[in-house]
Amino acid sequence: MKKICDFIARWMGAMVLIVAIFSLLVPASFSSVGTWVINPMLGIIMFGMGLTLSPQDFRIVLSRPRDILIGCLTQFTVMPLLALGLTWAFSLPEELAIGVILVGCCPGGTASNVITYLAKGDLALSVGMTAASTLLAPLLTPLLVWLLAGTMVNVDTLGMLMSIVYVVIAPIVCGLLCQRFLSSLTKRATPYLPAFSSVVIALLVGIIVSHNADRLLTAGLLVMAVVVMHNLLGLGIGFTVGRLLRLQKSKCVALSIEVGMQNSGLASSLAVLHFAAYPLAAIPGAVFSVWHNISGALVAKLYSEFSH
């Protein structure tokens, strides 16, 4: 069982890609599942994240404030500004622009810690950055979306804040409590969590893609171009910022991956919840979910080879 789970976690990018292509070509495979399940599924992923976090991870935030501050500042400036710049550069329709901006304003992705580990980056910094950016998200994500997209659409900042609290923060806190009071059970479950999260992420992508298959086929190439550039520029700028600040290579790698990999599932969830009048807004998050797992696996291989 453990070998199967390791295999699933290792090939998450390929699995997500296969599910995305299948749900695009055969939308009926997932379209019968209502979009209401997106939030509970994302909550399950966040609960798993809470199970894997420990007090030590939060002590990292306090013991390495400079590194975490650099990471969070880069995270919440580079990706939102890149998103805005790309929407202008490609003259994106309003619906797609909202989706790209939502992706850019979200915290670091849940898979970034695994990718950082595979890339031989500073895993402690990666975990600390994920924890810090996730905790800052209820405040910063709605605020940034309002600043960048508020001229295009009405942004319900309070509603978005509460959604992130319910979907992200509450499940993480529940996970932490389970770890504290059911430690033996948590320790037995932890080795299987990466594989479980990978399967849930793949199903999440399948549901979002199948519900938007027609629109995705229409705007697919344009969205793919923007998403790929957004992700690759984030990875590159994150690494460059670390180099300019003369950080160790392992820290530069962690910064690159944390900045480039977004919690795109949250972006799609917020699009479905708060921008229902703009169905295409969920598409960039779905495409990003597929692409950043593929690019993450590739850069992990690249960075790990450079470390030799």
Image (cartoon, rainbow, N blue to C red):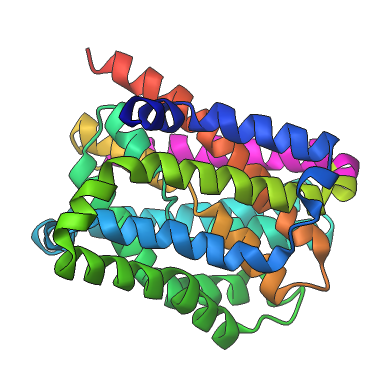
Identity of the residue drawn at 68% across and 77% down = 150
- Judge left or right: residue 56 versus residue 222: left
Give the percent coordinates (x, y) of residue 103. Answer: 59, 56
**54 or 115: which is nearer to us?**
54
Which residue is found at the position 58% from the left and 50% from the top? 82
Vertical position of residue 114 compared to residue 119: above or below: below
Q: Position of residue 297 (x, y in %)?
A: 45, 27
Q: Is residue 70 visible?
A: no
Residue at (64% x, 84% y) in the render: 156
Q: What is the magenta segment's predominant secondary structure?
A: helix
Which is nearer the eye, 82 or 12? Answer: 12
Residue lying at 52% horizontally and 77% vertically, measured from the top left? 143
- The vertical placement of 42 against 238, above or below, is below
Frontmost residue, 65 versus 130? 130
Q: Is 242 left or right of 238, judged from the image as shown?
A: left
Numbered range of the magenta stretch? 217-244
Where residue 240 appears, as percent x and y from the top left, is 37, 36
Q: In this rendering, does residue 79 appear at all?
A: yes
